[in-house]
Amino acid sequence: MSIHTPKIEKKVTLTSIAKMKGKEPITMVTAYDALFAQLFDGEVEMILVGDSLNMSFLGKEDTLSATMDQMIYHTQAVCNGAKLPLIVLDMPFGSYTSEEVAIRNANRAYQETAAQAVKVEGGKERAHIVKALTQNSIAVLGHIGLMPQFLRSDGGYKIRGKDAEDIASLIEDAKALEAAGAFALVVEGVKSEAAQAITKAVSIPTIGIGAGNSTDGQVLVWSDMFGFFETFKPKFVKQYGEGAQMIRKGLENYRNEVKDRSFPNEDYTY
Ligand code: KIV
């Protein structure tokens, strides 16, 4: 029996997230399966089933080839594991190229999973998509700043908000998404001063990743934060565990014990 007491005891809703702005920082992590979602249940306010799963779960080089079917499959698993956090399905590249396509795919997200919201990447140029979704009763988490789905068209991952002009443009993005009905915004890969200015400019919560500590919350990719993803480690990732090392050590012990026949001993034998 687990002696662990969850920090959060009630189901997190869009209303409770909205109320946290300016009061208490929001915690969010990614999850891709029921096993880990269950571990995160009651520990964070929000879970993102991110298209980052294409890299950390499927071993692809970027997020671009993730599909709606994949996102639905993993979101179903996460919803089976976690009952308390607000769960967001990340709309993959190509799944919101027009209002009609976005509504069709987001309807699938709502009908085939228990996710409470979807996330879309894009600023003012995508505000009409966000508006179409929110007007059709789909809750949307916006995503501005460095947007991994723009990797090829932007010519790489680029930190944003380095000058006054770009900060002004990011603020316009944030305001356009707020006006379109987004309930919160992920702000990724921007200078801390820019994230602070964006956070001040809107009344919806901002959730930062690589955006300093002035946003209304933080999100990290679980496999990065627990040291399982070793391909590369961006500057903003703090490791809260040494997952890969733990597994290697455990496997070494297992291998040695099987080889010398000390496992299974009587304790593990019928
Ligand atoms: O896909 C993802 O995990 C994300 C986070 C990095 C915000 O979009």
Image (spheres, rainbow, N blue to C red):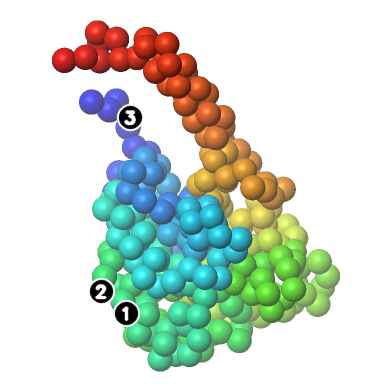
Residue type (three-letter) at the residue carrying disc 2: Gln
Kindly report the distance in space between the C-alpha atoms of the residues bearing marks 3 and 1. Answer: 36 Å
Give the residue at mark 3. Answer: 4
Kindly report the distance in space between the C-alpha atoms of the residues bearing marks 3 and 2. Answer: 33 Å
Nearer to me, 214 or 34? 34
Residue type (three-letter) at the residue carrying disc 1: Asn
Q: Secondary structure at mark 3?
A: loop
Measured as percent of width and height from the top left, residue 203 is found at: 54, 70
Residue type (three-letter) at the residue carrying disc 3: His
Q: Which residue is found at the position 62% from the left and 67% from the top?
A: 148
Rate crowding at label 3 as few (under 14), some (14 to 19) or many (20 or more) other CA atoms within 10 Å. Answer: few
Give the residue at mark 2. Answer: 111
Give the residue at mark 1. Answer: 107
- Labelled pair 2, 1 in contact (Cβ < 8 Å): yes
Q: Quarter of the image for the C terminus: give it.
A: top left
Give the number of the disc on residue 32.
none
Q: Secondary structure at mark 2?
A: helix
Q: Quarter of the image for the N terminus: give it.
A: top left
Q: Earlier in the sequence, mark 3 or mark 2?
A: 3
258, above or below 148, in the image: above
Q: Residue furthest right?
A: 163
